[in-house]
């Protein structure tokens, strides 16, 4: 059996190279004409984009600076050698009290006539440069600009450094709308115009690539502006945004006082989960690959502290109740946008992991209010407590422990209509040829991976499986946290996570060949970034089962299987 560890360049990579050469030949005749109308980089400084060129009501956009810069051609090349035009600017608000939308556009000299819009993260408020590696990228993958893609990103229309709390911008209606969806559309339109000014023509293909909040943004673009992007990669998207925030507050309250799980208690919980669920996937490797089975298999009551003791080797009643609460569905007293009435519970398997339960759910210290510095709290409680006050109640002084959705029904319905990317009708996106790669990490404690499962199922219910298969590919990575990280609790080895999803979405859009048998890799952290392990990244609802022979570090030793 051929080993993935020793295999040469993949057929898809070879096809991508051939397609690129064909593209270069095809556009060679038009390059001279485009060059006649192109502007030098420096000439972009001071240029403006009129509101009529922006597809939503907007103030004008202005370029504040434009200069040629350089970056390395690949992670293995330390010397900056790839030239690109770095364009900084902002879009003026309509409301004088609202902040501008800042953006960065990067235009490489070796342009391939394509572009990638980067998504943000958290509550944004930080300018996304479009120069960083993409989420889950292989360590040896050049960044998109070095590969010839124009890229851009935005702060979504507010600056965290100027806010008393990171959610405070939501009290301004225009800033809220920009964060919800408008900033990404506006920046897309402005960036296309800037690319046209620089190159003499607009991009031939435009992709959106984001994770977490950025994943939500990508789905929002497919739902609201289906003609704007040819392909979208949405990783661990915060789809049911309102549901996540309220569930985060509920979970934080359950973890207060005697319900708090210290990092030592989290280790105890994780060890028990592994003992109950790890081997169910055919391999005792410290990773729960059969991701959907553990909730029905593991019983936290088995960790109950007996005889009145309460030490790190067991859980008291309040802690068991907190663990069970985190796994429960949160049900709203009224429907949200698109008829959604609940938020799914979280999965087992990633408790004692990098970026796992301590970081996102239980925290290094018990959750309290008023909020201490972020480093002392779980991110879910810190984010949720702020979102409930500034977004859902519109009252910064509200004690989130006393929040009741029914008291703020009208505002919550409005926020859900703005923020939740739960619309299952992607028919317009499909009709214009759009392609979507959706990915969930099944040990995610930042947002429930089952929210992605439920959204995918809603799209299938709306459009039919055969239709959905033509434009959506939904993948899962068992054992991975929100960031994509994961380690084996047996030997500490990193979970394979690296994959070039930009190449996959680009090839699908350009050549009409959908990705299918994808492989994620773990690599050494320094050049030549040798592959140390690999695993298949299975399409939902499949999971990677060990075949019973061969190296557990080789993807060829696994098969993607589906439970009955």
Image (cartoon, helix red, strand yellow):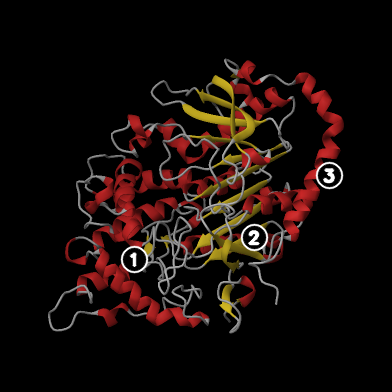
Q: Name the residue under label 1.
A: 326
Q: Which mark is residue 22?
A: 3
Q: Residue at x 57, y 25 (%)?
A: 87
Compare marks 3 and 2 and give the one earlier in the sequence: 3
Callout 3: helix, strand or loop?
helix
The residue under label 2 is 473
Task: Determine the image quadrant of residue 302.
Answer: bottom left
Tell me whether circle 1 and circle 3 mark residues in contact (CB < 8 Å).
no
Picture layout, residue 32 above or below residue 129? above
Q: How far apart are marks 1 and 2 (CA)?
A: 28 Å
Q: Can residue 430 be seen in this view?
A: yes
Q: Which of 353 and 395 is in front in this view?
A: 353
Task: Identify the residue at horizontal 62%, vertical 45% (top origin).
Answer: 142
Q: Position of residue 144 (x, y in %)?
A: 62, 42
Q: Which of pointers 3 and 2 indicates the residue nearer the eye?
A: 3
Question: Residue visible at 17% across and 62% down?
Answer: 257
Which quadrant of the figure has residue 294? bottom left
* Residue 489 at x, y percent in the picture: 40, 72
């Amino acid at each position: 059996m051929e080993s993935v560890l020793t295999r040469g360049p993949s057929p898809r990579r070879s096809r991508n190279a051939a397609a690129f050469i064909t593209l270069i030949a095809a556009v060679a005749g038009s390059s001279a004409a485009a060059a006649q109308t192109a502007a030098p980089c420096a000439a972009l400084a001071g240029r403006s984009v009129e509101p009529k060129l922006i597809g939503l009501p907007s103030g004008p956009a202005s370029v504040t600076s434009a200069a040629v810069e350089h970056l390395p051609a690949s992670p293995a090349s330390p010397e900056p050698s790839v030239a690109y035009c770095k364009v900084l600017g902002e879009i003026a608000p309509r409301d004088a009290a609202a902040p501008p939308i800042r953006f960065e556009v990067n235009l490489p000299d070796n342009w391939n006539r394509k572009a990638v819009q980067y998504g943000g993260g958290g509550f944004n408020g930080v300018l996304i440069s479009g120069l960083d590696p993409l989420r889950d990228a292989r360590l040896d993958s050049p960044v998109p600009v070095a590969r010839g893609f124009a890229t851009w990103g935005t702060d979504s229309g507010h600056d965290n450094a100027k806010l008393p709390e990171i959610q405070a911008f939501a009290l301004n209606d225009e800033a809220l709308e920009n964060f919800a969806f408008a900033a990404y559309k506006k920046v897309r339109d402005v960036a296309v115009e800037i690319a046209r000014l620089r190159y003499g023509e607009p991009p031939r293909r435009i992709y959106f690539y984001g994770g977490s909040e950025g994943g939500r943004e990508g789905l929002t673009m497919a739902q609201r502006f289906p003609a704007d992007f040819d392909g979208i990669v949405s990783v661990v998207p915060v789809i049911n945004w309102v549901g996540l925030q309220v569930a985060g507050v509920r979970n934080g309250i359950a973890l207060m006082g005697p319900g708090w799980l210290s990092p030592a208690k989290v280790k105890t919980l994780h060890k028990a989960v592994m003992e109950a669920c790890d081997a169910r996937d055919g391999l005792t490797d410290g990773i729960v690959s059969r991701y959907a089975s553990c909730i029905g298999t593991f019983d936290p009551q088995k960790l109950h502290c007996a005889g009145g003791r309460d030490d790190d080797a067991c859980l008291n009643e309040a802690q068991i109740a907190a663990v069970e609460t985190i796994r429960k569905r949160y049900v709203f007293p009224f429907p949200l946008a698109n008829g959604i009435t609940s938020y799914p519970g979280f999965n087992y398997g990633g408790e004692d992991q990098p970026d796992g339960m301590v970081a996102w759910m239980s925290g290094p210290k018990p959750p309290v209010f008023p909020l201490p510095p972020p480093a002392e709290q779980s991110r879910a409680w810190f984010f949720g407590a702020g979102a409930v006050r500034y977004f859902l109640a519109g009252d910064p002084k509200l004690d989130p422990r006393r929040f009741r959705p029914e008291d703020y029904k009208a505002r919550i319905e409005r926020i859900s209509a703005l923020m939740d990317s739960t619309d299952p009708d992607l028919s317009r996106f499909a009709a214009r040829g759009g392609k979507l790669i959706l990915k969930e990490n099944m040990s995610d404690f930042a947002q429930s991976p089952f929210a992605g499962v439920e959204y995918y199922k809603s799209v299938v219910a709306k459009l039919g499986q055969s239709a959905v298969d033509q434009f959506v590919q939904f993948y899962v990575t068992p054992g991975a946290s929100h960031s994509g990280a994961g380690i084996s609790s047996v030997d500490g080895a990193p979970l394979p996570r690296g994959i070039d999803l930009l190449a996959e979405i680009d090839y699908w859009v350009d050549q009409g060949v959908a990705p299918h048998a994808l492989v994620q890799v773990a690599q050494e952290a320094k050049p030549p970034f040798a592959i140390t392990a690999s695993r298949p990244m299975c399409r939902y609802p499949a999971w990677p089962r060990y075949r019973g022979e061969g190296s557990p570090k080789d993807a060829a030793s696994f098969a993607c299987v589906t439970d009955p």
